[in-house]
Image: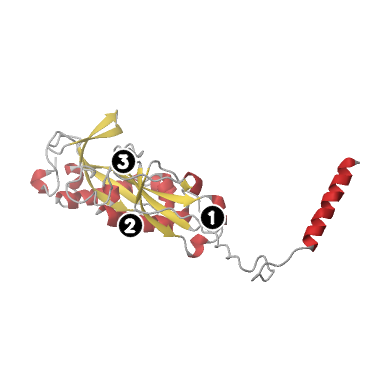
Amino acid sequence: MRRWLAALALAGTVTVLLAGCVRPGGSDGDLTDDWPALAAPRLFVPATDTCLPRVTAIVQAGTYEVVDCSRNHLAEAIHVGTFTGAAAAGDRPEPGSPGLRPARAECDQRAREVLGGDWHSARITLNIALPSAPAWRGGARWFRCDLSETGSIDNTRPVNRTGSLRGAMIGDSPLIHRCFDPKLIGENLNYMAPVLCTEPHRAEFVGVYVERDMTWTQFRRAHRQAHTRCMALIAVFADVPNNSDLPYRAGSIFYPPSQREWEEGDRGVRCFLWSDDRKLTRSMRGAGPKGLPAI
């Protein structure tokens, strides 16, 4: 009974105080109309031209982190673009889906501008980072283009580096693919060991062709066509005729994108000159028929 009486007494006190309120001088009595309006919430957008301690396909504001490019890092953000049109409608495109093709095309162009060359021709990989699914539902429509240095043509996992990749393909860059000494298991290629072109070797990078019209499944069944396209690049690279003698001068090795990259729109196929009957001790660039004879 005492608790009820205390509460009643308190309520009565409050009533008296409210009844006795006096409006302060200069006040209009409205407690809200002079408050500033709250700013509209801003969507998180990652920065460009920054370096990143890790590689991730999904970027979240709560775990977002950048580092100075002079420190060890695994990736470098070179561009942040915006999905528009059909690509911006509906659900967020998933990594490895055709919905990322417009984004990858934009990233590819930007990467070439930043690097000073085609990233397919170097130990560099291009990845696309996306907002989380909840952020997409909240209106986020950005994508980020990330470049990473890789260990080798065979090991495309990003490796730690220091310094920006800006201009990394200009001049005599150690990242650019050149000569290799392929290691075989039986008749199957195991891996490509990079060597100086003045050292004995059997393979040399000659360029990239773009396969626009095939699905991934079709490409996997069209090895002969891939070799034909690479042989055409070898003829131009070595300055030899692309005729019936060409297979007696050299063979070819090709490295396609991964299936995920292919579905996203990366169709750049890397081509290599292959010499299975003799070791080479110089680059075959511009070698001509005498430098790359038909045997």
| Residues packed near mark 3 inside 10 Å, few (<14), some (14 to 19) or many (20 plus) | some
Sequence-wise, which precedes: disc 3 or disc 1?
A: 3
Sequence-wise, which precedes: disc 2 or disc 1?
A: 2
Identity of the amino acid at label 3?
Arg
Q: Residue at x 86, y 42 (%)?
A: 3
Residue found at the far left of this picture: 290
Q: Residue at x 56, y 59 (%)?
A: 90
| Residues packed near mark 2 inside 10 Å, few (<14), some (14 to 19) or many (20 plus) | some
Q: Secondary structure at mark 1?
A: helix
**Alpha carbons under labels 3 and 1: distance apart:** 31 Å
59 to the left or right of 17: left
Sequence-wise, which precedes: disc 3 or disc 2?
A: 3
Give the labeled residue for mark 3: 71
Q: Secondary structure at mark 2?
A: helix
Q: Quadrant of the N terminus?
A: top right
Give the labeled residue for mark 1: 136
Q: Secondary structure at mark 3?
A: loop
- Does 178 sit above or below residue 138? above
> Residue 115 location in percent, x, y?
27, 52
Which residue is more in the foreground, 23 or 132? 23
Give the labeled residue for mark 2: 110
> Residue 234 location in percent, x, y?
21, 48
Identity of the amino acid at label 2?
Arg
**Alpha carbons under labels 3 and 2: distance apart:** 23 Å
218 to the left or right of 255: right
**Alpha carbons under labels 2 and 1: distance apart:** 23 Å
Q: Are marks 3 and 1 in contact (CB under 8 Å)?
A: no
Q: Quadrant of the C terminus?
A: top left
